Image: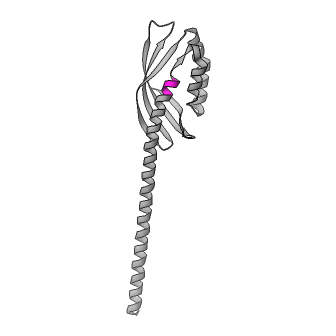
Amino acid sequence: MPSAVARTRRREALTLGLVAALTALMVAGVAYLGLRLRAEAQTESARNEAVAASRDAARLLFSYDHAKLEEDFAKGLSVTTGKFRDEYARTTSQVVTQVAKDYKAVVVADVVESAVVGASPDEVTTLVFLNQATTSTQTQGRQVDQSRVRMRLVEKDGRWLVAEVQAL
């Protein structure tokens, strides 16, 4: 039969082990909550930056003047990345350029509203409502078209760039 001293030591060791385990769990819990708070702060920052970038990008991507197409399309390309960049370059050069020149088109995009529909620290999806005012030889006066687009932006080298646009 163990002595009273041995039982007391076992009880103290068990208590110390239990306290150490609980302390480790608390430290892990606090670390987890800290990481979650940091991720949420990064996501909130991403939301704010990307929604502003999507507004600016929409103006550049959906506006052009037949008299300065290369300059306007270069501005559009500057806010794009990945496959969408290639798609934008192809569409503007193979479709829009000739039509814009033929009809002396000027299109001015004005963002009416935008909102975030999904976000993480390095990718944000926005919904952008815009009006495109067009003047051309094919219209009398200005024709205004209302559009909605979903834009997926990704953060690259400190900038938010458009990786995908979907007309709705």
Residue at x-position 41% and y-position 84%? 10
Residue at x-position 59% and y-position 34%? 82
Between 63 and 149, the one lying in front of the other is 63
The N terminus - image quarter: bottom left
The C terminus - image quarter: top left
Is 101 placed above or below 166 here?
above
Is 103 placed above or below 108 here?
above
Q: Main secondary structure of the magenta part?
A: helix
Return the x and y of residue 65 as percentages of the image width and height.
Answer: 54, 16
Is 110 placed above or below 156 here?
above
* Tally of marks: 0
Return the x and y of residue 19 as percentages of the image width and height.
Answer: 40, 74
Return the x and y of residue 84 as percentages of the image width and height.
Answer: 57, 30
Instruction: Say whether residue 27 is magenta.
Output: no
Colour scheme of this structure image?
A: one colour
Residue 45: name its quadrant: top left
Residue at x-position 42% and y-position 52%? 37
> Which residue range is magenta in the image?
57-61
Return the x and y of residue 71 as percentages of the image width and height.
Answer: 59, 21
Residue 119: name its quadrant: top left
Viewed as shown, does residue 67 lie left or right of 22? right
